[in-house]
Amino acid sequence: MPTIAVYGATAYTSREHLLPYLINHADSASYTLILAGRSKAKLDALNESLGKAGADRRSVVATTLEDAAGVAALVGKSDIVINFAGPYQLYNAPALIDACVTAGKHYLDLTGESHYVANQVVPKFDFAAAKSGSVVIPMSGFDCIPGDLVIYHGLRTLQNKLGKGVAFAESTNFYEIGGGISGGTLASVSAAAEAEEKTDISDEWILTGASVTGPTPRPQLVYTPPAKVPNVPSYGAFFVGYIVNRTAIRRSWYLSRMTHPGPAHADNVPNGVAPSADFGFEPRHGDHTVFKESLAGFGKVRFSNSITAALVSLSFFVFAGLYMGLKFVRDLLKPYIPPPGTGPTKEVCEKGFTKITNVSVSDGDKPVAVVSRYDGKGDPGYYHTARVLAESALSLVLPAPKGTALPPLAHVGGVLTGPSALGMVLVERMRIHGVATITSEIVEVGAAESKKDI
């Protein structure tokens, strides 16, 4: 029976959302849980508060991430570790990743710090993880799996119909979200602003390696779909999540284009899923795809015209420039920002929503459009994030749903992404367990009706 360790188990998103979800999950009898963190007293209190359901399948481990022997012992008892102890660059997350990679165990976290992933995770652990078979997926919540996965689903739909020779020329996500403010996310933003080790966060290619690069679309005041199709948002404002999401999306693009896992690790791929030049059943991105994201609505407000979208974008740019650029502004606002480990009530989280409409247009002489829709339950930052994270972990340690299989890279390892490691297994698990549905349809550019719904 696989064991899932949750480090930083007393963090708000863990104790209020992830752990209750895992304890009451339909598959809960198929795995055991370790509640881990620094304080045994707090962990024991948390374990007691979670009730008697599944109590015989839960245990507590107290260790700090500075205690190498303690971390190794925790990882040795686990098949996968979920890390909530952020901001990750400040709380020694690399020590936990290193232990997982060394032991060939899997690792997930919720970091939104793409500069940290570029500087301290990909260059240090990607090759070693591929060598040991460890799957490392940073940014495994709302940042950045939903937007990445909806693109994956749309591309898969396109290539299932028209073949691997066609790909997306341009792909734009339109987000409509509702929910509370995340103290942990804001703490990560502050950590990024004050980080001593800087990476250009305006560069979407920072997770692809120095040898692979290309143009990064400039921020826009107003976003529109890349193709004229019905029943999609007409306008969008700049979306703050795009700054992080595009780096993960671009890494998925990069990983999809690898011709094979590599001769040094080919023996890690089990019989029946040996990769071909294009990963067999997995979609492959084209050479010059342009990715964009925008915010089409927040709460009950929809940005139905270009003026509204432009004003929202301008407001964000002014605030972001002041907050990221001036320490005294961050200090001034600090008393009004929820601290890490806090969040809105469960009722607020449950009433939230996470919706994405992706509009993509294919390359080639006769382009078609693909419209994909991601419909997720709950607010993005807490309720939905916890469930996406949980199903991502379960995708790696439990049998795949009928008709699905993990992508070949999941059997090789490395610093991966949701689509490249989990693919349709995660899509189907989220559908089965009521977390989110993803649908895609191919339409003629400018057409009024869909040509195919998959």
Image (tube, rainbow, N blue to C red):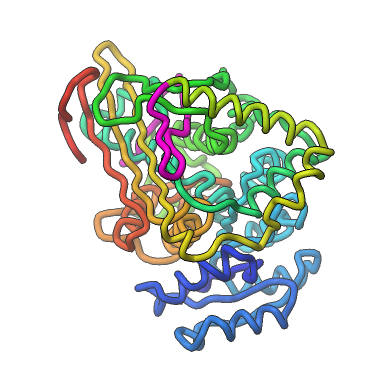
Q: Residue furthest top?
A: 365
Residue 110 picture location, percent across and down: 59, 53
The residue sitting at 63% across, 57% down in the picture is 101
Q: Is residue 163 left or right of residue 90?
A: left
User: In the visual, does 438 lie left or right of 240?
Assistant: left
Asked if residue 80 is positioned above or below residue 269 in the image, the reply reads below
Please tell me which residue is depicted at 76% across the width and 57% down the height of the picture: 91
Q: Is residue 322 left or right of residue 77?
A: right
Tag count = 0
Q: Residue at the spot x=50%, y=48% of the render? A: 142
Q: Is residue 208 above or below residue 48?
A: above
Q: Using the rendered view, name the quadrant where residue 230 is placed.
A: top left
- The structure residue drawn at horizontal position 59% and vertical position 82%, both measured from the top left corner, is 47
Q: Position of residue 261 (x, y in %)?
A: 48, 41
Where is the N terminus found, in terms of image quarters?
Answer: bottom left
Looking at the picture, tell me which residue is in the foreground, 164 or 9: 9
Residue situated in front as seen by the camera: 21 or 204: 21
Q: Is residue 84 above or below residue 196?
A: below
Residue 130 visible within the image: no
| Residue 311, x across and y down, in percent | 54, 25
Q: Is residue 314 visible?
A: yes
Question: Which quadrant of the rendered structure holds the C terminus?
Answer: top left
Quadrant of the image occupied by residue 296: top left
In the rendered structure, the answer to whether residue 243 lies left or right of residue 279 reads: right
Q: Is residue 245 magenta?
A: no
| Residue 280 is one of the magenta-drawn residues | yes
Quick one: 180 or 223, which is closer to the camera?
A: 180
The stretch of residues the image draws in magenta is: 279-305
Q: Position of residue 56 (x, y in %)?
A: 50, 88
